[in-house]
Image: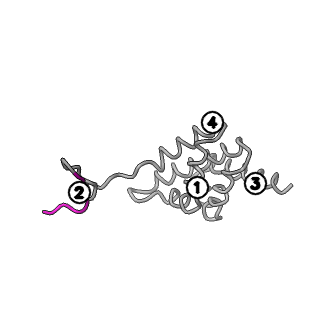
Amino acid sequence: GQYEDQKGAAYAVCNACVGGGPAVMSGIVQLGSIPRLCELLECPDASLIFSILEALEAGLRLGAETSHGGPNQFAVLVEQAGGCEKLEALQMHENAEVFQKAGHVIDTFFGEEVEDAAIAPVAQATHFSFGMPSS
């Protein structure tokens, strides 16, 4: 009973995230739904997991569009909720759609950070140099 109620509520939230606009997504975030959706990424229902991934992707896309060059605040919420670790674990999921979608979300929104050339290691002939270059 309780799992079925949670599942129904999760589908409703996911549908609102995917079909709603920025105001709906903002309301969902303000209600604290992101940590709960991230928790449900570990449920046994592949269809629900895929819906959650779709919802998270919609939020991450909106966060990227509204970040104005700053950090994607939606991505920050997902990271704080432990969602990145759960997304990485889903790359080993038995359902092909789930692991492909999880990989896509990671690659698109949590890919490699831009490397700061000023502090990146510099390869020398015999060693690497770390630190700030001298002027």
Q: Quadrant of residue 48?
A: top right
Please report whichever mark, 4 or 2, sits nearer to the chain's N-terminal start.
4
- Badge 2: few (under 14), some or many (20 or more) residues near its Cα, within 10 Å? few
**Which is closer to the viewer, label 3 or label 1?**
1
Disc ID at residue 73: none
**Which is closer to the viewer, label 3 or label 4?**
4
- In the rendered image, the residue lying farthest to the top is 96
The residue segment tinted magenta is 127-135
Question: How far apart in space, not on screen, are marks 4 and 2 (Cα)?
Answer: 43 Å
- Badge 1: few (under 14), some or many (20 or more) residues near its Cα, within 10 Å? many
Q: Which residue is mark 2?
A: 129
The residue sitting at 60% across, 61% down in the picture is: 29
The local secondary structure at tag 2 comes to: strand
Q: Amino acid at mark 3?
A: Ala
Q: Which residue is mark 1?
A: 83
- Image quadrant holding the C terminus, namely bottom left
Q: Position of residue 50 (x, y in %)?
A: 65, 43
Q: Which residue is mark 4?
A: 97
26 horizontally vs 131: left or right: right
